[in-house]
Amino acid sequence: MPNFPAVFGDTKFRYIAKSDTGEILIKVTQKDEEFFLQIKQKDDKYLVKAEKITRPSQVVFLQQALRDFRDLCGCEATYSNIEPQKTKNKKRYEVLKDIDFFASDFENDKEIWIEVGFGSGRHLLHLAKANPNIKFIGIEIHKPSIEQVAKSCELQNIQNIYVLDYDARIFLEFMEANSVGKIFVHFPVPWDKKPQRRVISNDFINESIRVLKKDGQLELRTDSDKYFKYSLEEFLKLNKTDLHVKKNQQSAISSKYEDRWVKQEKDIYDIIMINQEKSVSEGAIGKISFDDLFDFTKIKEKFANITKRDRDSFLHVEDIFSVDENNGMIKISFGASSKNERAYVLFSKDSTRYFPDNILKTKSNKRAHGLLNGWLKEISGE
Ligand SMILES: C[S@@+](CC[C@H](N)C(=O)[O-])C[C@H]1O[C@@H](n2cnc3c(N)ncnc32)[C@H](O)[C@@H]1O
């Protein structure tokens, strides 16, 4: 193993960190990007690869760092897949946005309508064409549907749709209070055996109320009488609400699912909740980072693999790595039970910071950060 820090070619190898469980990480800087390489020992050989949580934005940075590490060590590679390859250029559609766009760049300058789980996109595309002055956000987790709808937008030159690959149960957190006109949830998966995966829940209804304008509406359409009854009960848990229930009403455009259920003569139910109140705007969540400096020596002394919970948020501290007596990091997973994130927290004499540091500003991440901050204070005796 070389001495750290070291430089080879374009790559700076900052330090090596080791965990008690035998994991080895090397901190690397390539073209202003920081990431870890991970080393695993297998008999008398070493496997050096990308560390999953901190992958760089481009695979070529990683390949270059791996080649530079091989040459820095002067080791012989018995197997490698790090030579530059011709990678297929995946088409990037303009309508496809990632969650960071909604967290920081999305402008609420027009009426917004949201469709959750748009599937084939028939309803979303129809609405967007019929309402060119409205901004549509379509949220899906099924990649082929996302690709297909993004492609249709491009082919049909539809410019008022933003397509997002994200879990809709968390997405509403990114929208401002009183900013949305309509939310459509059409034929959601009923998840009879895993109810925790359902889109409609108490949290989702309350978040909808927060983001909907006064008189805005949340529209559920389902063919499942179980899901209909479950959802109605959830809506009725509200202290005060304006609900409209309909059965077998034809809609302006029917989706593939709807066609199938109608053919099978299944009943179709709508629940429409009209929002009655203007919600109080909450302040922005702000950057999730540490105000205090934590002493790595103390953290190491009291370290434990803990799990903590606060409502739907959790924190799991997985491992600790030491660079030297005063420097090191912990590996954590955290966030909402339905959408967890993973990161490291790096400790040095002059900083305590997340790595990667672009922690999404969600309420569940903020709560998990509170759990971590509290635990770090507790074990470092502050
Ligand atoms: C039964 S399909 C209905 C599709 C479409 N709304 C229609 O009526 O044809 C349900 C869709 O919801 C999507 N979905 C399920 N859970 C989701 C979630 N948490 N966030 C976003 N989309 C989700 C699924 O991928 C699927 O495409």
Image (spheres, rainbow, N blue to C red):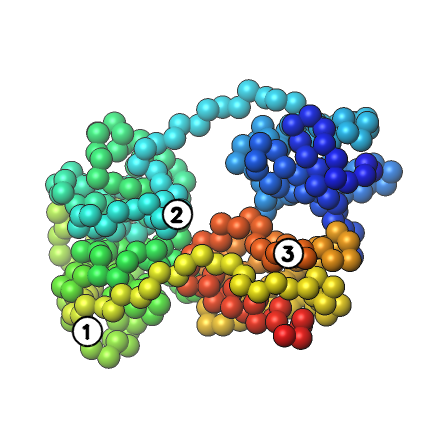
Please give left or right for residue 199 compared with residue 66 in the image.
Answer: left
Q: Nearer the viewer, residue 1 or 306?
A: 1
Res 183 quadrant in image: bottom left
Distance Cα–Cα, label 1 vs label 2: 31 Å
Q: Residue at x 36, y 44 (%)?
A: 101
Q: Quadrant of the C terminus?
A: bottom right
Residue 350 - label = 3
Distance Cα–Cα, label 2 vs label 3: 31 Å
Q: Position of residue 226 (x, y in %)?
A: 31, 66
Between disc 1 and disc 2, whose residue precedes? Answer: 2
Between marks 3 and 1 in the image, the one whose residue lies nearer the viewer? 3
Looking at the picture, does residue 106 appear above or below residue 237?
above
Res 154 quadrant in image: top left
Amino acid marked by disc 2: Ile
Q: Secondary structure at mark 3?
A: loop
Q: Are marks 3 and 1 in contact (CB under 8 Å)?
A: no
Between disc 3 and disc 1, whose residue precedes? Answer: 1
Residue at which label 1 appears: 241
Is residue 127 visible in the rendered image? The answer is: no
Q: Position of residue 318 (x, y in %)?
A: 66, 60
Q: Residue at x 41, y 59 (%)?
A: 286
How many C-alpha atoms fall within 10 Å of the one at disc 3: few (<14), some, or many (≥20)?
A: few
Residue at which label 2 appears: 99
Q: Secondary structure at mark 1?
A: loop
Q: Are marks 2 and 3 in contact (CB under 8 Å)?
A: no
